Image: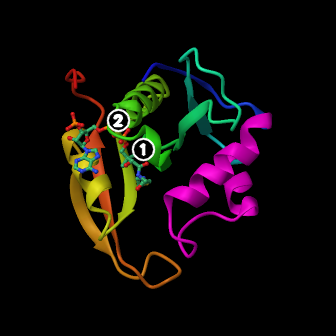
Amino acid sequence: MRFTVRDYRSDDFDTLWAIDQSCFDPDISYSKDELRLYLRRPGAFTLVAESTDEVSDPNGLAILAFVIAESSRRGMGHIITIDVRAQARRHHIGSALLDAAEERLRAAKCHAVRLETAVDNTSALSFYKRHGYDVIKIIPHYYSNGLDALLLEKSLLLVPASS
Ligand SMILES: CC(C)(COP(=O)(O)OP(=O)(O)OC[C@H]1O[C@@H](n2cnc3c(N)ncnc32)[C@H](O)[C@@H]1OP(=O)(O)O)[C@@H](O)C(=O)NCCC(=O)NCCS
C-alpha cells in the first residue's frame, strides 16, 4: 500500500471525523466539536496519510489515516490521537505518521512525548511498545464510559531507531 504524508487541510475534516468514528466505540470517539477543538489547539498539528496507489477512489478512501499531536511550551509533546482505517492497518502507515509526528515534536524542542490509550486497546499498546513507549501510570476513569487509560511516554532525546 503506497501512501504519502502531508499536512491537514480544512476540507479533510469530514473524512477525518468519519475515520475516527470507525476507529473507536461511540463512547470514546470524538464528536465533531471535540475534533474541531483538538485540531485548533495551540501548538497542535495534524498529519494525514494519503493513498498514492493509482486505483480510482470512488468512495473517497484516499485518506488512509491521520495523527493529531501538540507541543507544549514546557517541551512535552502529546499524541492526541492516531487513527488508521481498518482496511489500511498493518502496512506501517501508523508507524510513518507516528515517526513524522515525533520528528515535528523534536523540531519544536520537545524532549519527550506522552499519550493516553485505553487499558483494553491491545493493538495500540503493542504498536506503542514497538515504538519505544513505556507505561507511566494508570489514569482511572479517563474515558466518559468509565474506562481507565494508560499514560505512556517516550523520550525524544535519543536518536530514532529505524522501525
Ligand atoms: C494502533 C494503530 C494506530 C496501528 O496502526 P498501523 O498502521 O496498523 O500500525 P503499523 O502497521 O505501523 O504497525 C507497526 C507495528 O506495531 C505493532 N502492531 C500494530 N498493530 C498491531 C496489532 N493489531 N496487534 C499486534 N501488534 C500490532 C506491530 O509490531 C507492527 O509491526 P508489524 O506489522 O511489522 O508486526 C491502528 O491499529 C489503529 O488506528 N487502531 C484504531 C485507533 C487506535 O486505537 N489508535 C491508537 C490509540 S490513540
Using the rendered image of the protein, determine whether residue 78 is visible from the camera's viewpoint: no
Quick one: SS at disc 2?
loop
Is label 1 in contact with label 2 (beta carbons under 8 Å)? yes
Whether residue 73 sits left or right of residue 110 in the image: it is right
Quick one: SS at disc 1?
strand
Q: Is residue 81 above or below residue 149?
A: above
Quadrant of the rendered image holding ligand 1: top left
Question: What's drawn in magenta, residue-wise?
Answer: 11-39
- Give the amino acid at mark 1: Met
Whether residue 122 sits left or right of residue 21 in the image: it is left
Can you give x and y, in whole percent of width and height, for residue 19 in the image?
A: 59, 50
Q: What is the quadrant of the N terminus in the image?
A: top left
Ligand 1 lies under 8 Å from the Cβ of mark 2:
no
Whether residue 98 sits left or right of residue 38 in the image: it is left
Residue 71 part of the magenta segment: no
Q: Which numbered disc, 1 or 2, marks the residue that appears first in the sequence?
A: 1
Q: Residue at x 41, y 31 (%)?
A: 93
> Are there few (<14), some (14-19), or many (20+) residues within 10 Å of tag 1?
many
- Display colour scheme: rainbow
Can you give x and y, in whole percent of width and height, for residue 75 in the image?
A: 44, 39
The residue beneath circle 1 is: 76
- Give the amino acid at mark 2: His
The residue beneath circle 2 is: 111
Q: Is residue 103 above or below residue 44?
A: above
Q: Is residue 19 above or below residue 105?
A: below
Q: Nearer the viewer, residue 7 or 102?
A: 7
Label number found at residue 50 = none
Whether residue 20 sits left or right of residue 8 in the image: it is left
